[in-house]
């Protein structure tokens, strides 16, 4: 398995927490030394292990915000 390096540049918010203590978070993360992207995924309490997630550019995040604002929830 490839060694993935990451650095959490900014913790933006926690969406939820599981019974095991893992949290679903939105963060700004630099992956392998590249330009930081917005990242949504589950993290263990120490931020050493992570679940599958998705990364978004700033433009992606803006479009997602538009979509969410238009939803009737």
Image: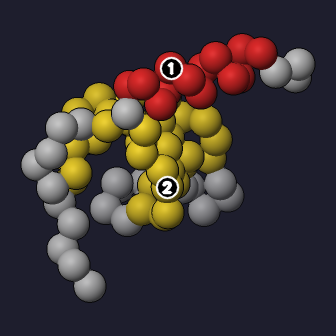
Q: Are marks 2 and 1 in contact (CB under 8 Å)?
A: no
In which quadrant will I find the N terminus? bottom left
Q: Is residue 12 left or right of residue 72?
A: left
**Mark 2 vs mark 1: in front:** 1
Q: Residue 61: x, y in percent?
A: 49, 27
Q: Is residue 46 left or right of residue 32?
A: right
Observer-nearest residue: 20 or 33? 33
Q: CA distance from mark 2 to mark 1?
A: 18 Å
Write down the residue under mark 1.
62
Which circle marks residue 53 in the picture? 2
Q: How does the figure colour the protein chain or chains?
A: secondary structure
Q: Quadrant of residue 48?
A: bottom left
* Nearest to N terminus: mark 2 or mark 1: 2
In the picture shown, does residue 1 fall above or below 6? below
Q: Secondary structure at mark 2?
A: strand
Q: Quadrant of residue 15?
A: top right
In the picture shown, does residue 40 fall above or below 63? below
In the picture shown, does residue 30 fall above or below 18? above
Label tally: 2
In the picture shown, does residue 56 fall above or below 31? above
In which quadrant will I find the C terminus? top right
Crowdedness near tag 2: few (<14), some (14–19) or many (≥20) residues, C-alpha within 10 Å: few
Observer-nearest residue: 42 or 66? 66
Residue at image location 67% in from the left, 58% down from the top: 19
Q: Is residue 45 left or right of residue 69?
A: left
Residue at image location 37% in from the left, 33% down from the top: 57
């Amino acid at each position: 398995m490839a060694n993935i390096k990451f650095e959490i540049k900014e913790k933006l918010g926690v969406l939820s927490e599981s019974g095991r203590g893992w949290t679903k978070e939105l963060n700004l993360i630099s992956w392998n030394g590249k330009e930081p992207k917005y990242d949504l995924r589950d993290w263990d309490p120490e931020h050493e292990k992570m679940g599958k997630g998705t990364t978004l550019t700033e433009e992606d995040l803006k479009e997602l915000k538009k979509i969410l604002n238009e939803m009737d929830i």
